[in-house]
Image (cartoon, rainbow, N blue to C red):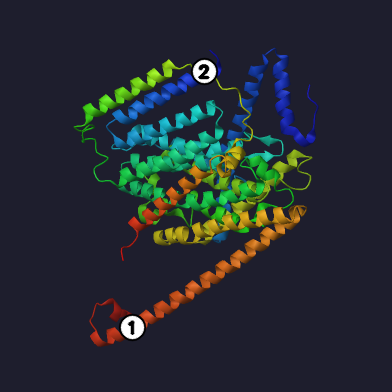
């Protein structure tokens, strides 16, 4: 019988299960198989049940932001509201549109949930608890999120509805574009940790979290992640007021529920990834000695990030599609490239010329480099704004003079001039 | 026959069947979706060869980028999504001949040689070794740089084609 260790209680349960199955006379390979299956199902069930709580949390917090109470009728503090919603969705009629492509239509919501749940395979919950500690973990996360894009395009196309197809178009344009800076800044934690394994990245954040060493990269990762989940202010793919819900307009009942499940779970998953890659994951006081504490830190950081996601969602209005792309290609991509070059340069200089310096000096140098980079960026923005304002004011004076000469009704310049 | 051989046979069958469906189905979007299945099962074959990095890169590049691009291009092309167009053009006898010749010569090549079994390698540090080999003067630095130049040329060309003409 395995020895009981209160600090590592989940691993103890895992070993206890193996020991108990062994006493039943089951051969060793099958015992390992059952142990692994139970672990996989536990992580999957945890991930799938989490939205029941996070949906309640989101509605409650968003309600407070909008000076409302949020759900407060079903159960204490409205805690069972999500259960009521699930039962409502389950009892609704399940409609497949007549012109829809049935197989693809039904496959798409499954694929979207699958693409999010499989990310949890590489998430380290504690120093001893990680599903699959593969050495290409970060690349795996990127690969799986591509499947989510495909599922949205499948749903949008197979609905045989022009608004759904428009949503799918926007998805392809937005998600593929925002993947570019996201993948570029993911190089920064990989470089700093010297490994693509997610657990190695968390281990490398013992002295300083990567958000301290690379705040610019962390911020860009967080912004692009919010764009990847398609939430306000980047919710152009479902934009209720323009294309009435986009890719999931034709979905009803629990199939619609699965889109929502996928979205809410993805929203929490990007918080988990931000916490793991930039906020130290399970790192914290005594987390190495008592792995259960690591789970607590991990969840605290993730829910902290989730609060910011809700905050962003209930604060900012939806941005226009040309602004969305200008912001991505003209700001995020160049800045992320600069952040990668800066991090590589400073990190290499510190480790080459100050070999015995240790992590504190390294973190300070990287933080200083980031601060200087941000100041330089703000200077560039300021100059750009000045140039733009001068161009606009010069143009207005010119049109003013022109309008005074012609004074044609209906000409934009004339209306403009008379307004001033 | 052990477990990994059974998995290999199943995955190989899925690869071949989905690849055949890609070229025989009349609906272009269905073809693209079956292409994703094919590419994904090739990634599984990489996993069976313990080439985890190649498997993940296969999914990132081929499914995450190329397949999405294909679907996007089809959605933007008028009438490409209708089932009426003919699947072949006048060149089908010539292409059939070339495809058959390629298959016969490849099959002959595979049968003629006794392929040596590689010894089990240590695959723990694959990504690091790959990165070091790409910047090593005695290894692959020249192809790596040539590929980088090619990518830059393609990027500049894309911007020129898409940009405003002045």
The relative height of residue A415 versus residue A159 in the rendered view (above or below) is below
Residues at circles 1 and 2 in contact by the CB criterion of under 8 Å: no
- The residue at 34%/20% (across/down) is B104
Separation (CA) of disc 1 from disc 2: 77 Å
> Where, quadrant-wise, is the N terminus of chain A in this rendering?
top right
Residue A251 visible to an observer of this rendering: no
As drawn, is A377 to the left or to the right of A165? right
Q: Position of residue B87 (x, y in %)?
A: 24, 32
Label 1 Cα neighbours within 10 Å, binned few <14 / some 14-19 / many ≥20: few
| Left or right position of B18 against B25 | right
* Mark toward the viewer: 1 or 2: 2
**Residue B5, which numbered label?**
2
Snapshot quadrant of residue A265? top right
Relative depth, front residue between B18 and B133:
B133
Dot 2 falls on a residue whose secondary structure is: helix
Dot 2, how many residues are within 10 Å of its Cα: few (below 14), some (14-19), or many (20+)? few
Q: Are marks 1 and 2 on the same chain?
A: no
Nearer the observer, A321 or A62 = A321
Q: Quadrant of the C terminus of chain A?
A: bottom left
Numbered disc 1: secondary structure: helix
The chain containing the residue under callout 1 comes to A
């Amino acid at each position: 019988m395995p020895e009981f260790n209160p600090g590592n209680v989940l691993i103890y349960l895992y070993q206890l299960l193996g020991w108990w199955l062994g006493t039943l006379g089951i051969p060793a390979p099958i015992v390992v198989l059952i142990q692994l299956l139970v672990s996989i199902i536990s992580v999957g069930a945890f991930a799938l049940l989490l939205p029941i709580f996070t949906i309640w949390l989101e509605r409650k917090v968003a309600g407070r932001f909008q000076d409302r109470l949020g759900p407060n009728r079903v159960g204490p503090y409205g805690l069972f509201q999500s259960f009521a919603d699930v039962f409502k969705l389950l009892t609704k009629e399940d409609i497949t549109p007549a012109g829809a492509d049935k197989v693809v239509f039904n496959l798409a919501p499954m694929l979207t949930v699958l693409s999010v749940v499989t990310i949890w395979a590489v998430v380290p919950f504690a120093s001893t608890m990680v599903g699959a500690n593969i050495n290409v973990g970060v690349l795996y996360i990127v690969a799986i999120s591509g499947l989510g894009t495909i599922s949205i395009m499948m749903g949008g196309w197979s609905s045989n509805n022009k608004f759904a197809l428009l949503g799918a178009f926007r998805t392809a344009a937005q998600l593929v574009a925002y993947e570019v800076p996201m993948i570029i800044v993911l190089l920064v934690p990989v470089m700093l940790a010297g490994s693509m394994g997610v657990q190695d990245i968390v281990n490398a954040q013992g002295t300083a979290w990567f958000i301290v060493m690379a705040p610019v990269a962390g911020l860009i990762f967080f912004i692009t992640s919010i764009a990847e989940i398609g939430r306000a202010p980047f919710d152009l793919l479902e934009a209720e007021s323009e294309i009435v819900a986009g890719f999931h307009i034709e979905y009803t009942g629990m199939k619609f529920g699965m889109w929502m499940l996928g979205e809410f779970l993805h929203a929490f998953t990007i918080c988990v990834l931000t916490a793991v890659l930039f906020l130290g994951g399970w790192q914290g006081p005594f987390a190495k000695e008592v792995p259960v504490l690591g789970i607590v830190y991990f969840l605290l950081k993730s829910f902290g990030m989730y609060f910011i996601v809700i905050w962003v969602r209930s604060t900012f209005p939806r941005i226009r599609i040309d602004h969305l792309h200008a912001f991505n290609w003209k700001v995020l991509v160049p800045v992320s490239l600069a952040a990668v070059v800066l991090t590589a340069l400073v990190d290499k200089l510190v480790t080459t010329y100050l070999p015995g310096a240790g992590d504190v000096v390294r973190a300070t140098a990287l933080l200083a480099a980031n601060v200087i980079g941000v100041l330089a960026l703000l200077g560039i923005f300021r100059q750009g704004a000045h140039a733009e304002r001068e161009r606009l004011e010069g143009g207005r004076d010119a049109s003013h003079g022109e309008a005074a000469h012609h004074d044609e009704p209906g000409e934009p310049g004339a209306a403009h001039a008379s307004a001033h | 026959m052990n477990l990994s051989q059974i998995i290999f046979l199943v995955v190989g069958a899925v690869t071949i069947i989905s690849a055949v469906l890609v070229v025989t189905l009349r609906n272009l979007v269905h073809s693209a979706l079956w292409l994703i299945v094919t590419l994904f099962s090739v990634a599984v074959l990489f996993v069976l060869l313990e080439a985890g990095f190649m498997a993940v890169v296969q999914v990132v590049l081929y499914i995450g980028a190329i397949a999405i691009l294909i679907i996007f291009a089809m959605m933007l092309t008028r009438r490409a999504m209708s089932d009426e167009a003919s699947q072949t053009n006048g060149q089908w006898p010539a292409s059939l001949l070339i495809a058959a010749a390629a298959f016969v010569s490849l099959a002959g090549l595979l049968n003629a040689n006794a392929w040596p079994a590689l010894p089990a390698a240590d695959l723990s540090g694959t990504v690091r070794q790959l990165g070091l080999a790409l910047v090593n003067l005695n290894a692959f630095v020249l192809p790596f740089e040539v590929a980088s130049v090619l990518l830059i040329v393609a990027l500049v060309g894309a911007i020129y084609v898409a940009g405003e003409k002045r």
